[in-house]
Image (cartoon, grey):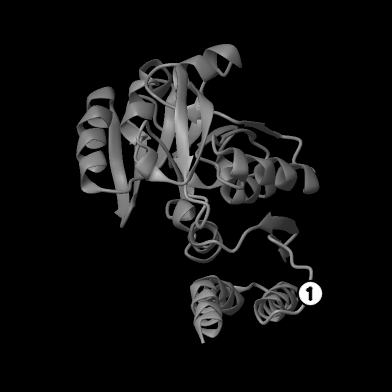
């Protein structure tokens, strides 16, 4: 009876992952992607009931001309919906990749926005992702799709250069730069750089579009890019709470950025000192 109870609990604990896969299945862009999800899902089910089935931890799907390797965890599924379904980064015509020559993606995750942008324009793209468990898939996705205009770096973006610990939860792969071990059950020491140092080191004369999604550290990232922001034309920023938003808004206004649009969790700015 005890063993049966444990098996039941174990099976129920895996249901959320299956629901996430089914959620993606409902949003999958084509038949090929749906078949990939079906295969992934049933292999996991067979393994759950005790059959010696070899399962994959990652799904490989085709979205348009892109081949994407990802894990069906909530964070990556949310990114998929934001970029390919809700198109939150294409809410304003001047923010489209075709209007940009240099794009910096801070918080690239597995590269969904980076790949979408690289596929729809000729811009040079700099992508930054500190989480080592995610960065490997970012690199793999870039290489698999032959995106030679993208350069990826395993770094966090902050107010000052240095090193810190990144904690992440193995059940979501969502990470946060913090000295607090309660932020996740895995951690790694990571390098922190600044926007100002990036532009100096890589001789980036200006940024047409800066995308910022750094898990609550948006204000720190902006502080480390005060000089860079003067030559940045557009900024799209994801914020995770009102405290971050209230810090960032006056800082950006002081530098000369005007907010032209906002949807829940995302703000769009244009540098009034430069124009587009």
Instruction: Tell which of 4 and 234 is nearer to you.
Output: 4
x, y percent for residue 10: 53, 74
Q: Residue at x 39, y 23 (%)?
A: 229
- Is 82 situated above or below 191? below
Give the quarter of the image for residue 122: top right
Q: Residue at x 19, y 39 (%)?
A: 246
Q: Which residue is mark 1?
A: 52
Q: Secondary structure at mark 1?
A: loop
Res. 194 visible in picture: no
Res. 235 visible in picture: yes
Give the quarter of the image for residue 35: bottom right
Instruction: Tell which of 263 and 100 is nearer to you.
Output: 263
x, y percent for residue 83: 53, 57
* Circle 1 residues within 10 Å: few <14, some 14–19, many ≥20: few
Q: Residue at x 22, y 34 (%)?
A: 247
Is residue 171 found left or right of 51 in the rendered image?
A: left
x, y percent for residue 74: 49, 62
Number of marks in the image?
1
Q: In the picture, which quadrant includes the C terminus?
A: top left
Q: Residue at x 50, y 15 (%)?
A: 197
Is residue 180 found left or right of 144 in the rendered image?
A: left
x, y percent for residue 177: 42, 34
Question: Residue lying furthest front in this view?
Answer: 1
Is residue 18 found left or right of 254 in the rendered image?
A: right
- Is 272 situated above or below 137? above
């Amino acid at each position: 009876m005890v063993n049966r109870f444990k098996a039941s609990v174990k099976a129920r604990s895996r249901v959320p992952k299956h629901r996430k896969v089914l959620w993606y299945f409902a949003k999958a862009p084509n038949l090929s992607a749906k078949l990939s999800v079906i295969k992934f899902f049933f292999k996991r089910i067979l393994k759950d009931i005790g059959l010696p089935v070899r399962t994959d931890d990652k799904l490989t799907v085709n979205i348009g001309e892109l081949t994407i390797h990802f894990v069906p965890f909530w964070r990556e599924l949310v990114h998929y919906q934001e970029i390919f379904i809700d198109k939150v980064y294409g809410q304003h015509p001047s923010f489209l990749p075709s209007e940009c020559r240099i794009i910096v993606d801070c918080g690239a995750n597995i590269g969904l926005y980076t790949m979408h942008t690289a596929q729809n324009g000729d811009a040079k793209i700099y992508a930054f992702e500190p989480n080592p468990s995610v960065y490997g898939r970012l690199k793999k996705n870039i290489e698999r799709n032959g995106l030679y205009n993208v350069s990826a770096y395993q770094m966090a973006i902050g107010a000052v250069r240095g090193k810190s610990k990144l904690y992440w939860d193995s059940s979501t792969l969502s990470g946060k730069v913090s000295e607090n071990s309660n932020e996740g059950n895995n951690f790694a020491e990571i390098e922190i750089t600044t926007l100002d140092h990036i532009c100096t080191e890589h001789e980036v004369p200006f940024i047409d579009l800066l995308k910022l999604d750094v898990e609550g550290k948006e204000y720190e990232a902006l502080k480390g890019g005060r000089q860079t922001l003067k030559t940045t034309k557009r900024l799209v920023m994801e914020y995770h709470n009102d405290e971050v938003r209230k810090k960032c808004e006056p800082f950006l206004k002081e530098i000369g950025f005007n907010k032209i649009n906002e949807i829940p969790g995302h703000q769009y700015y244009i540098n009034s000192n430069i124009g587009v």
